[in-house]
Image (cartoon, rainbow, N blue to C red):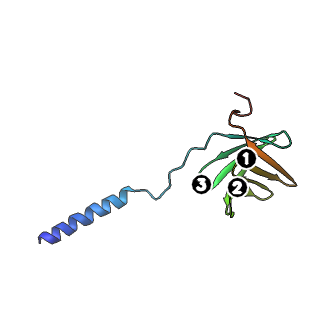
Amino acid sequence: MRSYLFFITFLCLFLLGACSTSNVPERLPPTSPRTLVCNNGQYAYINIYGPDKAALKYSDTTYSLKRSRVASGVKYEKKDVFIWNKGLSYLVHIEPNNYTCTPQPDLIDGLGL
């Protein structure tokens, strides 16, 4: 009887713990926009919205991108647009052009603040 009561108590605590956890991942806040200056003199801004989403703003257009698997670096893409980070440089591709961009940590939103 005592082991039966222990088993029921343990089972209730286990089920209570399982019910209290959520399977829905916590939504992460976006990162601050990372300012990039590209080899054509334009600025690009990238925000990371979690492990698999990013937004790229380039020349007054914002693109929603999804992370894709690559052998090295981090790449976000959608159709004819991608941004690929490999260390300290970024390759921004907006069909049909490629731009090499580098981060500018001293610039906030391109205002030089």
Q: Position of residue 85 (x, y in %)?
A: 71, 52
Residue 51's tag is 3
What residue is shown at x 18% (from left), y 67% (from top)?
Answer: 6
Residue 92's tag is none
* Of the pair 78 and 111, the residue shown nearer to us: 111
Q: Which residue does the numbered mark 2 point to in the structure image?
A: 76
Q: Amino acid at mark 1?
A: Leu
Tell me the quarter of the picture where residue 81 sits.
bottom right
> Which element carries disc 1, helix, strand or loop?
strand
Q: Are marks 1 and 2 in contact (CB under 8 Å)?
A: yes
Q: Position of residue 102 (x, y in %)?
A: 75, 44
Q: Is residue 11 left or right of residue 37?
A: left
Q: Amino acid at mark 2?
A: Tyr
Distance in Å between CA atoms under marks 3 and 1: 15 Å
* Of the pair 109 and 7, the residue shown nearer to us: 109
Q: Position of residue 50 (x, y in %)?
A: 59, 51
Tell me the quarter of the picture where residue 71 sits.
bottom right
Looking at the image, how many numbered discs can be counted on the residues? 3
> Which element carries disc 3, helix, strand or loop?
loop
Distance in Å between CA atoms under marks 1 and 2: 9 Å
Q: Which residue does the numbered mark 1 point to in the structure image?
A: 56
Q: First in sequence: mark 2 or mark 3? A: 3
Give the farthest residue toward the front: 88
Q: Is residue 106 left or right of residue 12?
A: right
Q: Amino acid at mark 3?
A: Pro
